[in-house]
């Protein structure tokens, strides 16, 4: 099974979350490793709504269009509310992607409409 550091070499990660019906919805996302894998996404996104229902998720490295570039892994994704952890996730994304990345143009302090999710291996 790949580690967070191994996955972090990829530019995109396919994050699959599940609807109440059990249907899987995969979405390519920007992500970074910092004591786990972090994804930052708008708080009203489908991913966040689905993760509020269930922390069950799957991940795989992918290209920008979501074509898997490696094996899928079963994981647990946790929505994070801790301010320190949220700052860590934004810092990790900034370090990985720089000003051209997914948070370009965002004022982290003012932008509370985003949610951070930590992705961990299934236990």
Image (cartoon, helix red, strand yellow):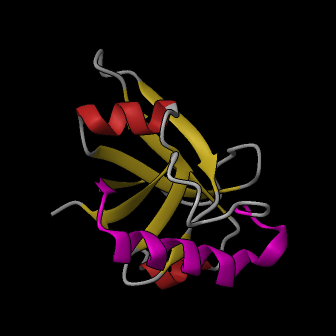
Give the farthest residue toward the left.
123
Residue 1 visible in rendering: no
In the picture provided, is 119 more to the left or to the right than 88?
left
Q: Determine the image quadrant of residue 67.
A: top right
Residue 116 visible in rendering: yes
In the picture provided, is 6 more to the left or to the right than 12?
left
Disc count in the image?
0
Q: Residue at x 78, y 63 (%)?
A: 104
Give the farthest residue toward the right.
100
Magenta stretch: includes residue 108: no
Q: Is residue 32 shown above or below 15?
A: below
- Tell me residue 16's x, y (percent): 46, 41
Q: Residue at x 55, y 49 (%)?
A: 41
In the picture provided, is 54 more to the left or to the right than 108?
left
Q: Residue at x 77, y 78 (%)?
A: 98
- Nearest the eye: 67 or 17: 17
- Nearest the eye: 13 or 79: 79
- Tell me residue 7's x, y (percent): 54, 74
Which quarter shows the N terminus? bottom left
Q: Which residues are magenta?
A: 77-103
């Amino acid at each position: 099974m790949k580690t967070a550091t191994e996955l972090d070499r990829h530019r995109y990660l396919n994050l699959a979350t599940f609807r109440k019906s059990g249907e899987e919805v995969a979405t390519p996302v920007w992500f970074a490793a910092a004591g786990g894998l972090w994804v930052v996404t708008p708080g009203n996104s489908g991913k966040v709504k689905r993760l509020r229902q269930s922390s069950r998720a799957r991940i795989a490295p992918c290209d920008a269009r979501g074509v898997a570039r490696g094996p899928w892994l079963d994981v647990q994704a946790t929505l994070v509310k801790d301010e320190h952890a949220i700052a860590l996730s934004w810092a990790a994304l900034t370090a990985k992607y720089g000003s051209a990345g997914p948070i370009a143009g965002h004022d982290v302090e003012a932008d509370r409409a985003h949610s951070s999710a930590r992705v961990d291996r299934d236990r």
